[in-house]
């Protein structure tokens, strides 16, 4: 069982004591006072849970939880236009950079030539066994799933060769769990579940700071990047 902090005990006692005093000031009915104190117990417990939730959100530096990718695409595009250090980790990034299907594809095309930023992309290797495993999880044809990854790589090559975008691509082979886009000191993180695309799941909007989740995912990206296979584009 999770340990209750001293602060939570004090808050709980304060709620019950104050509630009891208010009842005593309003009535001399002892039974009513006891009933009121009993009713305040779940209220004080709810306050403790709310406090814990607030501390988790505050300490982890979670700004907002969006219901899915569609819910935050406009915000992501705005951040993208201002960012100079962009890092993307996904399986095939089809809904991010998949030619004209990716929601960031048009935004990248709007970048001026000579744009001084950097984009690094980590994709699951098309020949990784996890590629077909993931395709099976979301009931998609395995060859089509792999082809979409190849198409994303081709689009990245196009951006580099024809648009002069400073963009790099590497492949990793480990089992994918996370999907995220980091833009300077803020990011949007999702995950992979059976039967559901990462773009359809909640997107956690993070920002950098002491003990933040953003910094943890930033470190994860750099670790994977350091061991991933460079793709010549």
Image: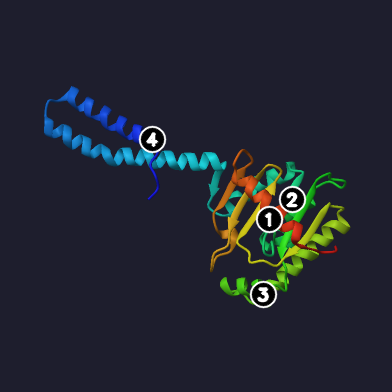
Q: Secondary structure at mark 3?
A: helix
**Quadrant location of residue 191?**
bottom right
**Residue receiving disc 1:** 103
Q: Which residue matches tag 4?
A: 6
* Label 2 residue SS: helix
Residue hosting label 2: 107
Of mark 1 and mark 3, the one earlier in the sequence is: 1
Give the Cα separation between the discs numbered 3 and 2. 32 Å
The residue beneath circle 3 is 129
In-image side of 127 versus 42 (left or right)? right
Front residue (pair 5, 201): 5
Q: Sequence order check: which comes first, mark 3 or mark 2? A: 2
The mark nearer the N terminus, 4 or 1, is 4
Whole-angstrom CA distance, mark 2 to mark 1, is 8 Å
Mark in the foreground, 4 or 1: 4
Q: Is residue 195 above or below residue 66?
A: below
Q: Residue at x 32, y 37 (%)?
A: 44
Secondary structure found at label 4 = helix
Q: Earlier in the sequence, mark 4 or mark 3?
A: 4
């Amino acid at each position: 069982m999770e340990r209750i902090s001293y602060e939570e005990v004090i808050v709980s006692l304060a709620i019950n004591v104050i509630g009891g005093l208010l009842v005593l000031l309003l009535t001399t009915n002892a039974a009513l006072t006891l009933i009121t104190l009993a009713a305040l117990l779940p209220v004080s417990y709810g306050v403790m849970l709310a406090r814990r939730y607030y501390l988790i959100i505050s300490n982890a530096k979670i700004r907002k939880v969006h219901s899915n990718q569609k819910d935050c695409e406009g915000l992501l595009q705005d951040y993208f236009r201002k960012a100079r250090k962009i890092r993307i980790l996904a399986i095939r990034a089809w809904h991010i950079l998949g030619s004209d299907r990716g929601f960031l594809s048009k935004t990248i095309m709007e970048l001026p030539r000579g744009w001084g930023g950097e984009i690094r992309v980590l994709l699951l290797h098309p020949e990784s066994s996890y590629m077909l495993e993931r395709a099976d999880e979301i009931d998609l044809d395995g060859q089509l799933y792999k082809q979409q990854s190849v198409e994303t790589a081709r689009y990245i090559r196009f951006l580099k060769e024809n648009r002069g975008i400073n963009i790099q691509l590497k492949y990793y082979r480990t089992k994918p769990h996370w999907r995220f886009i980091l833009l300077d000191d803020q990011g949007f993180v999702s995950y992979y579940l059976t039967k559901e695309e990462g773009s359809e799941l909640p997107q956690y909007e993070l920002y950098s700071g002491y003990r933040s989740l953003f910094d943890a995912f930033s470190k994860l990206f750099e670790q994977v990047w350091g061991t991933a296979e460079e793709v010549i584009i």
